[in-house]
Amino acid sequence: MNYLIYILLYSVVLASSRIHAANLFAGEEVDLGPYNIKAAVGKKVPDNLQKAEVDVQVSTNARTLVEHLRSKFSSGAPPLPPLDPYKSKGFSAVSLDGNNNLLLTGKINIKEVILTGGKDFRLGRIELSTSNNNIKVNLELTIPELNGNVLFDAQLRLAGIFPVDVQGEIRASLKGVKIDGAAWAEEKKAAKHIYNLQGLRADFHADDIKIRLVKSNLSEFIIITAGSYIPIGPNTGLRSTIQNLVKNYVADEVFKHLNSILSTLTIGEIKSLLKVN
């Protein structure tokens, strides 16, 4: 679910050629249309890992486990918290400093993200490879509709002069979500015997994304100024800068949160869940 949150955050800051900042800042619903992302984080995920004899059964067990967790999405299944609605905090600040293409500098704090719709997932392929002190997961799933609310505040400067202190909430709707991904982890013997994420890659698609700034304390002056001077169409250096900025942020946060989740379970506990001898 953390990965879906970062996809949501990634989607929120990018716009199509028809959209300028003023539309979003003025509280209008912005239709971004269809959306595709290819992401790779960490080391290259091996195309093929040597399979153990038990991997076919382990993959079947993993599918059974994932489907069982669907009934626990509202209540949670320790150590997993409730997943629908899923609430998450503890994100690192997004720094806008040091980017020459940006008229805004400063930092954005993601205070909380609330995500609903995850329990309606449809699991396509799930394959596990578990040999040679490694575990690799290939996963395909679709979600008919995801809805999210992003609460944030920001301490910014426009053109290095005008202070812009913002508190707000962005609402997003993603329809026809499809994810095709792979993750690779290695055994790590530290305080306890755990898996440590080494690499992650994913192809993400949404049939349609809509976003809206539902609450903010932006002044009319800032809205007008932003609308005049911050176009974010596809042919601007600004849009490219935002893409790279958010992509790097997503990469760091995904790794941090997924490894945090993995650290709560020993390898023995994971193998027990998957019924691996």
Image: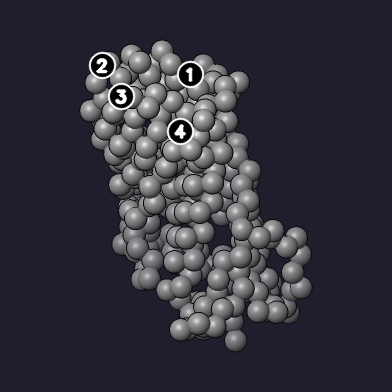
Earlier residue among tags 4 and 2: 4
Amino acid under label 1? Pro
Residue ID at (34%, 45%) = 110
Callout 4: SS: loop
* Residue 123 in the image: above or below residue 170: below
* Residue 98 in the image: above or below residue 157: below
Quadrant hosting residue 136: bottom right
Q: Report crowding for label 4: few under 14, some 14 to 19, many 20 or more residues within 10 A (C-alpha).
A: some
Q: Report crowding for label 2: few under 14, some 14 to 19, many 20 or more residues within 10 A (C-alpha).
A: few
- Residue 146 horizontal/vertical position (percent): 43, 41
Q: Residue 13 has which mark? A: 4
Earlier residue among tags 3 and 4: 4
Q: Nearer the viewer, residue 239 or 269?
A: 239
Spatial distance from mark 4 to mark 1, Cα to Cα? Answer: 12 Å
Contact (CB < 8 A) between labels 2 and 3?
no
Q: Which residue is mark 2?
A: 220
Callout 2: SS: helix
Contact (CB < 8 A) between labels 3 and 4?
no
Earlier residue among tags 4 and 1: 4
Of circles 2 and 3, which is in front? 3
Earlier residue among tags 3 and 1: 3
